[in-house]
Each structure stands twice: as structure tokens, then as C-alpha cells.
Image (cartoon, rainbow, N blue to C red):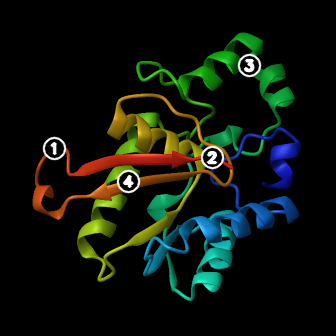
Amino acid sequence: DKDWDKALRLQGWADNPINTNGRAQAKALVPLLADKGLELIVASSLLRARQTAEIVATALHIPVITDSRLVEVGLGTADGMSFAAFREKHGEDYLQRFLRSVADEDMDISAGKGAETKREAQARIMNALSDIAVNKSAHTVGVACHGLLMTLIAGYLNNSVVKFGNGDLLHIAFDTASANSATPWRYIYIYRQ
């Protein structure tokens, strides 16, 4: 959790810290990950993901590195806007269409000038995950990123829409033998806090 969650602000690349509840959510991940054999966590370069990763990594005695390709979907000029301000500027219908666009693969509404499309963000995250899987020396890697990115990953791998919240886990696996195929990833499970 971040204070912006409670304030109902759109969050993309804004670099906000986690709050007390967010730290508790991160600590709650530790027992879930303790027996997974993680050797490394690769985190988004945004503060909230780095803080989450550092809490987990400290407890598991593993290193954290960052990758800027794991940042949340860019919302352009809408980043940091309250839902109320967004609604006032664009209208209720546009706000609802924007919120639904996360769930509708065919709908891609930019939140503001300079915003990233879903397809751009999905390509970015899947390229980053493939690079992490192929190029890192660690066999089992945790990735600390963001809810909308996790939704895009699940949509790509499972061809379904699953919305993720703070502290949720998505377990996926990369099959190195299929690294050059169109589908080297396996969708395993979701854990919700």
C-alpha cells in the first residue's frame, strides 16, 4: 500500500514509498517465498517496488538488483492525478472506459499525454522477463514490479484478465529449452493477500 492508494490517485511512474501497511504486506510475503529457493530479486527501479523487494530480500538473505523496464505502466500527464480530477477533466464515461481498458485487450485508452499503451508496456515487461530468465546467473529469481504490469503478464501468458493488488504474487516459470519459441513461459499460480 501507498498513501496514494488511499487518496485514490492514479499511479504510474510516480516514485512513491510504501506506507506502514505496505511494509506489513511485504513482510507477509516472506513466509510464502521462504521455501521457493529464491536466489535473487530483480525489482522495478521505482521506490515502492524496491522497498518491497528489500524487505523480502533482507529476510531471505538474498541480493536485490533493479531493472528500469519493470516500472509500472506510464500514465503520462495523468500520473498522480486523483480519480476526481481525472473525472473532472475527462468525464465519468472516460474514467470508466480507462479503468476497463486494463481488462479489455482490444481497448487501449491513454490516460494522458505521454502515456504508454498496454501493448507497449506488455512488450516491455515480457522482454525484461525474458532477459532476466536468460541472462541472470540465478536459477530462481523473484521479480518485484507493479499490479498493472502483473495484470499484463497474466493476460499475455494465460490469455485472461486477472487484476492484481498490492502484495499479490504471480508464479510463472521460464522453460529454457523453449527459450526461442513463442511460449517459453508457464503460468503456475496466483496468491492474493
Q: How many marks?
A: 4
* Gap in angstroms between the C-alphas marked 2 and 4: 15 Å
Disc 3 secondary structure class: helix
Say which quarter of the image contains residue 121: top left
The residue type indicated by label 2 comes to Arg
- Which residue is at 56% across, 41% downward? 114
The residue type indicated by label 1 comes to Ala
Disc 2: which residue: 192
Q: Nearer the viewer, mark 1 or mark 3?
A: 1
Label whose residue precedes the other's in the sequence (3 or 2) = 3
User: Residue 111: x and y, percent?
Assistant: 62, 31
Per the rendering, the mark at residue 172 is: 4
* Gap in angstroms between the C-alphas marked 1 and 3: 39 Å
Label whose residue precedes the other's in the sequence (1 or 3) = 3
User: Residue 14: x and y, percent?
Assistant: 70, 55
User: Residue 17: x and y, percent?
Assistant: 77, 65
Per the rendering, the mark at residue 182 is: 1
Callouts 4 and 3 close, C-beta under 8 Å? no
Horizontal side of residue 154 vs 71, given as left or right? left
Disc 3: which residue: 90
The residue type indicated by label 3 comes to His
Horizontal side of residue 186 vs 160, given as left or right? left
The residue type indicated by label 4 comes to Ile
Label whose residue precedes the other's in the sequence (4 or 3) = 3
Q: Nearer the viewer, mark 4 or mark 3?
A: 4
Callouts 1 and 3 close, C-beta under 8 Å? no
* Gap in angstroms between the C-alphas marked 1 and 2: 28 Å
- Which residue is at 26% across, 75% downward? 135
